[in-house]
Image (cartoon, rainbow, N blue to C red):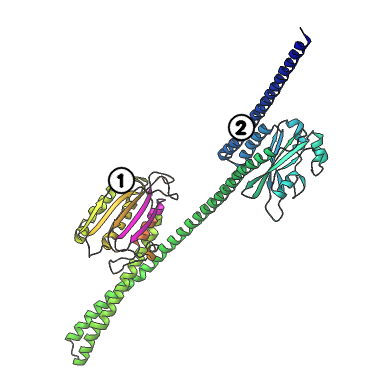
């Protein structure tokens, strides 16, 4: 082969070789980039999985300690570091990081001595947890041999610990706890990992906040229960006092009533004397005038006062008995209860020319006699306070009404009328003892709604009233559907 042809062939071969080498280099770059992308994707997937799993654990854990232990394990599995610990932050003028017994040890025999370094409290700036406490940011020690600001330096070196990291557990911007991890390798800070752990710290902060709120709620419930017991004792004392005083007042009232009757008889005797006796005309006239006017009026007021006071005593006795009555708990057909009440009131309903309708009433859990008293009082009030200028309409019904504060197992009933409305300022007073909004409309002592409220509350229920000017009023009664705590 001629030399020129050989040179040309070699040149072409070199050119093709260079092209292949360039293509191979490009292919290697693409492979490397793809591998990096896959590693980044895998890393991001692991990060997402860590965040999801810690969020799930945080929501499902029954306590702060359980959530922290599970999350320590999840983080350890993610970063591969063999030790982890939780610190709580003290409250007070100077915050300190206080070690807890919430540890993770990959090799208990090897790291037990280090884990047992108890009694340490990290003031701001001293030790890794305290650095986090000082600035609220994650911290990383790459090599403990170059960073002596570590109170457990000697114990760490003895067991081969080289690097550590810590991050804050936050409720909003407040540090409430700190998580610290250790490894036996010298590792440079991983900023992406620290960012992720900061998010984990925010999730764990929700666990701490929930735990604190539950603790506060438990304390409030305990205080409420204690106050309820105390209030029940006070009510018993008051009821016993009222009962005793009412009986003590009854005796003098009976005497007063007897004396007033005796005075009446004496007056009749005097009348006979004045009318038949041999008396001067002026004396007879004056005597009869005193008997017919002054004495008769005085006796009338004495008897009216005695009756009024007797009615008040009866009212107080009814109030005291209402708190001591034994309830017979059972499912009550309220439709039948209301029908029975209306049947007893049929004459009054006819006299007032009222139209009463009853809707479907689901059963309630309670005492049938006491619930009959509730609806008898409410229907009696509705009849008494009808507006005579329009036809009387009364409706007894049930409605679906569920609020956050209501018991999910309760039913809401109502008694609605188109009678005289209740002023808004008086809505809260209608259930108070001796309160009467329209005394000119009906007789009574103002105790009916007080008794109704007591009965409903003994059923763990609720009663309230809504009123619209010119349209009438609606009394709502919420009662339990089932046994609950009552038996």
Q: Residue furthest top?
A: 1
In the depicted view, which residue is nearer to us: 99 or 6? 6
Q: Which residue is mark 1?
A: 333
Q: Is residue 469 magenta?
A: yes
Mark 2 Cα-neighbour bin, 10 Å: few <14, some 14–19, many ≥20: few
Give the vertical position of 463 relative to 262 (above or below).
above
Q: Where is residue 236? Give x, y as percent.
A: 45, 58
Q: Nearest the camera: 160 or 438?
A: 160
Depth-wise, is mark 2 or mark 1 nearer the camera? 2
Is 448 left, or right, of 110 in this rendering?
Answer: left
Task: Please identify the quadrant where the N terminus is shown.
Answer: top right
Q: Is residue 27 above or below residue 409?
A: above
Which residue appears at 26% of the width and 56% of the height?
394
Q: Which residue is mark 2?
A: 45
Image location of residue 303, percent across then percent down:
29, 73
Quarter of the figure with residue 70: top right
Q: Quadrant of the C terminus?
A: top left
Q: Which residues are magenta?
A: 455-484
Residue 427 coordinates in the image, percent (x, y)? 38, 62
């Amino acid at each position: 082969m001629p030399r020129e042809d050989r040179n040309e062939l070699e040149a072409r071969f070199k050119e093709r070789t260079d092209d292949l080498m360039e293509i191979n280099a490009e292919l290697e770059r693409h492979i490397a980039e793809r591998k990096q992308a896959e590693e980044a994707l895998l890393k991001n997937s692991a990060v997402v999985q860590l965040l999801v799993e810690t969020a799930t654990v945080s929501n499902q854990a029954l306590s702060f300690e359980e959530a922290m232990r599970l999350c320590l394990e999840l983080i350890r599995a993610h970063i591969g570091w063999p030790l982890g610990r939780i610190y709580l932050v003290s409250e007070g003028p100077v915050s300190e990081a206080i070690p807890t017994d919430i540890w993770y040890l990959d090799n208990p025999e090897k790291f037990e001595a280090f884990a047992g370094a108890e009694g340490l409290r990290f003031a701001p700036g001293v030790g890794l947890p305290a650095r986090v406490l000082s600035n609220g940011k994650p911290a990383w020690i790459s090599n403990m041999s170059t960073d002596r600001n570590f109170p457990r330096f000697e114990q760490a070196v003895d067991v081969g610990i080289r690097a550590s990291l810590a991050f804050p557990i936050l409720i909003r911007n407040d540090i409430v706890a700190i998580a610290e991890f250790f490894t036996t390798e010298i590792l440079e800070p991983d900023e992406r990992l620290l960012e992720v752990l900061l998010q984990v710290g925010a999730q764990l902060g929700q666990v701490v906040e929930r735990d604190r709120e539950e603790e506060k709620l438990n304390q409030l419930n305990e205080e409420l229960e204690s106050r309820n017991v105390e209030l029940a004792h006070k009510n018993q004392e008051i009821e016993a006092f009222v009962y005793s005083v009412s009986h003590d007042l009854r005796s003098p009232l009976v005497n007063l009533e007897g004396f007033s009757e005796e005075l009446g008889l004496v007056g009749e005797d005097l009348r006979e004397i004045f009318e038949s006796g041999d008396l001067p005309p002026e004396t007879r006239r004056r005597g009869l005038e005193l008997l017919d006017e002054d004495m008769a009026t005085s006796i009338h007021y004495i008897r009216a006062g005695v009756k009024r006071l007797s009615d008040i005593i009866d009212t107080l006795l009814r109030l005291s008995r209402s708190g001591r009555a034994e309830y017979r708990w059972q499912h009550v057909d309220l439709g039948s209860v209301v029908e029975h009440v209306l049947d007893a009131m049929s004459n009054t309903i006819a006299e007032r020319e009222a139209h009463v309708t009853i809707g479907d009433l689901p059963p309630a859990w309670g005492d049938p006699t006491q619930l009959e008293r509730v609806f008898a009082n409410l229907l009696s009030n509705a009849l008494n306070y009808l507006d005579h200028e329009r036809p009387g309409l009364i409706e007894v019904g049930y409605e679906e009404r569920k609020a956050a504060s209501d018991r999910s197992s309760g039913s809401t009933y109502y008694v609605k009328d188109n009678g005289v409305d209740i002023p808004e300022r008086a809505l809260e007073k209608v259930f108070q003892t001796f309160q009467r909004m329209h005394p000119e409309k009906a007789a009574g002592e103002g105790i009916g709604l007080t008794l109704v409220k007591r009965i409903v509350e003994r059923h763990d229920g609720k009663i309230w009233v809504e009123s619209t000017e010119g349209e009438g009023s609606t009394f709502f009664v919420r009662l339990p559907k089932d046994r609950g705590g009552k038996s």
